[in-house]
Amino acid sequence: QVQLVESGGGLVQAGGSLRLSCAASGSIFRIVAMGWYRQAPGKQRDLVATITPGGRTNYADSVKGRFTISRDNVKNTVNLQMSSLKPEDTAVYYCYLGAGWSTTDYWGQGTQVTVSS
């Protein structure tokens, strides 16, 4: 069983910064990617950023230049440094892990990020 535990969400003013962290544990085999998705009220869950074990990153256009994803392959953790936050970044942020030969998707419980204007 794989568990993803997130931390670091909260309330911040526009222009501020937050750092999200996620730790993966359990029977993890062949990690393909880790990352973050977000879901605003009434909207679908969208990609924020992902990173492969080799360090290749993929960012949503809306966060490029403002967010930075990083990971620790030994500890199986992934972090998201968010800067210059905007009200439209308000959402529940979900940690993501893709692993296994058929790339099973695993999700954290979600952490709320609220950016006030």
Image (tube, grey):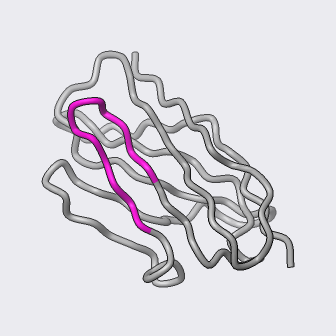
Q: Is residue 80 left or right of residue 94?
A: left
Vertical placement of residue 17 versus 72, above or below: below
Give the left or right position of residue 25, taking residue 39 as reference: left
Looking at this view, name the residue that lies furthest to the right: 117
Residue 86 placed where, x, y %? 71, 79
Residue visible at 48% across and 65% down?
Answer: 47
Q: Position of residue 40 (x, y in %)?
A: 73, 64
The stretch drawn in magenta includes residue 40:
no
Q: Residue furthest left?
A: 54
Q: Position of residue 32 (x, y in %)?
A: 22, 46
* Residue closest to the eye, 93 or 7: 7
Residue at the (36%, 59%) spot, across then down: 50
Position of 82 compared to 29: left or right? right
Above or below, 67 relative to 102: below
* Region rendered in magenta: 68-79
Tell me the quarter of the image containing the N terminus.
top left
- Quadrant location of the C terminus in the rendered image: bottom right
At a point 27% along the width and 66% down the height, the residue shown is: 57
Characterize the magenta stretch by its predominant secondary structure.
strand
Q: Residue at x 50, y 43 (%)?
A: 21
Q: Is residue 65 above or below residue 77?
A: below
Picture coordinates of residue 25 (x, y %)?
A: 38, 21
Q: How many marks?
A: 0
Residue 112 left/right relative to 95:
right
